[in-house]
Amino acid sequence: MDLSTIVTSISAASVVTGTIIAILQLRNFVKNRQAQLFMELYNKFLDPDFRKKEDSIFLAQWKDYDDWYIKYGPVVNPEMFYTLNSIMTFFEGIGVLAEKKLIEIDLIDNLMGPSIRDTWEKMGPLVKELRKRTGYRVAYEWTEYLYKTIVEYESKRGLTKEK
């Protein structure tokens, strides 16, 4: 083997090694960015104002869509209506990020799973009725997607919601 062949082989190995290192660094960067994005969302989730809004959903009582609309609709109770919309929209955004694989479902489930499940279980019937009445079939579709994904994720791992 002559010197030029050795140099060419070393050069090729260096390029391959450099490419592998770059790919590993990029993967690490993407994972770190996902974690950073999720932590920004989680900080919003932990904000006392957000927690109060979410609690107000669970304290609110209604029998059906009509009862909800009379008590909490945008005309009679705009603050509560905004609160409900704000929480659902927050989870809607997380649902989109989960579907696009920009945040791993295990992160979401580990830190927000119970809240997402409980919120959809309370609000889902209203959303489904809203879809029927307005014809807006995609209302909160990503919140529902997120809920179903979390339920499926937990089911595959043998986790169940405690009652």
Image: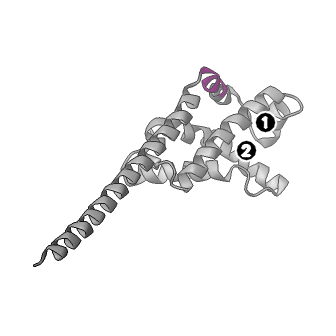
* Label 2–label 1 contact, CB within 8 A: yes
Which type of secondary structure does the marked residue at label 1 adopt? helix
Look at the picture and state if 144 lies above or below 87. Answer: below
Kind of residue sitting beneath label 2: Leu
Q: Where is residue 68 in the image (x, y as percent from the top left)?
A: 78, 36
> Mark 1 belongs to which amino acid?
Trp
Marks 2 and 1, how far apart at CA? 8 Å
Q: Which residue lies furthest to the front in this view?
A: 3
Q: Residue at x 26, y 63 (%)?
A: 14
Tell me if residue 130 comes above or below residue 11 in the rendering.
above
Q: Which residue is painted at 63% across and 51% down in the image?
A: 142
- Residue 163 in sight here: no
Q: Quadrant of residue 20?
A: bottom left
Residue 33 locus on image (x, y percent):
47, 44
Q: Mark 1 points at which residue?
A: 68
Q: Which of 148 and 36 is in front in this view?
A: 36
Residue lying farthest to the left in this orientation: 1
Q: What stretch is highlighted in magenta?
A: 48-53
Q: Which residue is drawn at 55% across and 26% down?
A: 46
The residue where tag 2 is placed is 126
Question: Residue 27 shows which numbered tag?
Answer: none
Residue 79 % position (x, y) = 79, 26
